Amino acid sequence: MRLEALHLDRGGRIFLALLAVTTLLVPILNLAVPADSPLHVSTYTVTLLGKYLTYALLAVAVDLVWGYLGILSLGHGAFFALGGYAMGMYLMLQIGDRGVYGNPDLPDFMVFLNWHELPWFWHGFDMFWFAALMVILVPGTLAFVFGWLTFRSRVTGVYLSIITQALTYALMLAFFRNEMGFGGNNGLTDFKDLLGFDLQSDATRIGLFIASALALAGGYLACRYLVNSKLGRVAVAIRDAESRTRFIGYRVEQVKLWIFTFSAVLAGIAGALYVPQVGIINPGEFSPLNSIEIVVWVAIGGRATLYGAVLGALLVNYGKTYLTGVMPDAWLFALGGLFVLVTLFLPQGIAGLMRRKEVQA
Amino acid sequence: MKTLDRLRQGLLRNRAWDLTRPDLSLELNTSHGTLLYLEDISVSFDGFRAIDGLNLYIDAGELRCIIGPNGAGKTTMMDIITGKTRPDTGTAWFGQTIDLLRLSEPEIASVGIGRKFQKPSVFEPLTVFENLELAMAADKRVWPTLRARITPEQRTRIEEVLETIGLQEHRTRRAGALSHGQKQWLEIGMLLMQAPHLLLVDEPVAGMTHQEMDRTAELLTSLAGKHSVVVVEHDMDFVRSIANKVTVLHQGRVLAEGTMDEVQNDPRVIEVYLGGEDVHGPMA
């Protein structure tokens, strides 16, 4: 990874520095500082932060395709959820005979459904490396096939957005069915341990938090590298004048296809880190509303900046945690209102506000 | 997909023998002195014949102007050459070996046909330099583009083109901030970066001031010789100032061809340009 990619990216440097400090401080404040000290960070907060970081990675993935390539994907939640399911399947098989029914081979929901053996697509998920591979391959393959079909037919703009929305909706309906073999509407839950580490222990929580921070930093740098490369400029060219880009000789479909697939893989990784921290994955993650919410994070944070997406994801989710605690009914109104306000008054998002200050100074 | 495309081509009456032809060639060969052959091209949109049995030949190194009233098929002709529109019948060859009708738009761009659109369409958020960099002839597949670094030779090439189009001082400006004329030149510069054999230039001086027009005329004439240039233009003074050979299109076919003076004195041309339905010239 070339760090030279960062030298023009002030927002990115600030973000990465803050991320590094947080990643160093939080484990110390959680593990080394006694629980009665005001500086102590509770394990609940650590897990919450870890969850936010996976959302931030998801937002970066969406910003890459929306902000730079002009593909408004309203279905990125699907790739996130698929990565999550791949991880969830591994975690399910780690439970072994500690489940409610004590069946060493089958997850509880299969015993409940009177199944006698593991469906073929569950094989291999007892090995971590296989599950990790699937975290990348399943969302990547789906995005590749989906992208190949749509980009090649030159489906763009709002039509593409609607199709992505339909994609995630269809997957949601499919995963709700018990016969699919993914736990139906309950999804996968009751996880015990990951790679032998107890998921309830503080140390494992810290480990997952650090892994999420590293994944976010890595994903950010990879996207920054891509955006700063000539391919990134081609992406911007495609966003603003697709047919013109074709006439100067770029294979627009291919560029879109690969960047879209890469973005889906990032979303899948985010999902895989999300699931062990929240302890459950169910078809609700495929809900179209979720995917739209991701887009709102990016819009609020500021499109086509990458760090803006991180900022948006963190702020909105903090607001969500806070508001749903204080007055649960108000959250959707607040989110909608925020989106309208940002669209009207801050078309560049919060990051755009900072950039404007920079220009004035 | 390739097989299916082949099959589909085999079903077209005029292309039935494609199967027997040697495989796709991308090697340009102009040993007969002609760069572009358009023969018997027709295309209709919803029953309207935009191009109707068009025959056009462009020599290597030639500067050709194409004029004609609105709806004469000038832009459609460019669309066909660049692969945006597929003709119903006819053949389009680039040199003696490259069959344009079997190539996609990016492939046509990479064999050496560059196009400037009527409206200036530069990439506005990118700088002038970056616009030229993107247009530069290079391996334009995804992975090489991701790994691309500008070599010193490429930098020199971009500087040369910046000088040719007179935008050296503006290299770091956003293309969106340029004036209309500068955008047009930048777009011509982008064409040059593609190192094309054939430049298709659609209305280069629309909306330009007189000084800008003169500079554009200079620019285009200096390009002929090294490249073949086809200019579609409405402005007659401009056409007169650059062209030695003019083709007049009318209702999708070639009406007249020759020097500007010959063409202007051609009674058929006079009728098309000056006469309406009710005025009948000496020609039947």
Image (cartoon, coloured by chain):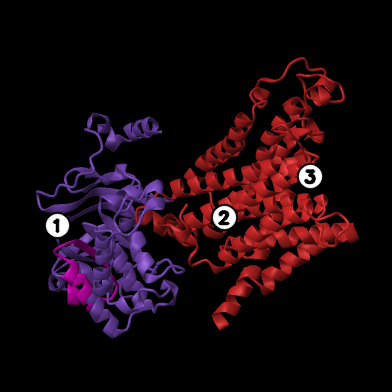
Q: Callout 3: residue from which chain?
A: A
Residue B242 in magenta stretch: yes
What residue is at 32 percent from the left and 59 percent from the top? B150
Secondary structure under tag 1 reads strand
Quadrant of res B155: bottom left
- Give the mark nearest the N terminus, 2 or 3: 3
**Distance from the alpha carbon under mark 1 to that under mark 2:** 52 Å
The spot of residue B232 in percent (x, y) is 28, 66
Relative placement, left or right, of A235 versus B73 is: right
Secondary structure under tag 3 reads helix
Q: Which residue is mark 1?
A: B59
What residue is at 39 percent from the left and 54 percent from the top? A246
Q: Which residue is mark 3?
A: A202
- In the depicted view, which residue is nearer to us: B215 or A351? A351
Disc 1 vs disc 3: Cβ atoms closer than 8 Å? Answer: no
* Chain purple in the figure, letter: B
Residue lying at the far left of the rendered structure: B32
* Chain red in the figure, letter: A
Quadrant of res A355: bottom right
Q: Are marks 1 and 2 on the same chain?
A: no
Residue B190 in view here: yes
Mark 2 residue type: Tyr
For residue A207, the mark is: none
Q: Which residue is mark 2?
A: A220
- In the depicted view, which residue is nearer to us: B145 or B6? B145
The spot of residue B17 in percent (x, y) is 25, 32
Residue A75 in view here: no
Check the image and report above or below for A268 versus A46. above
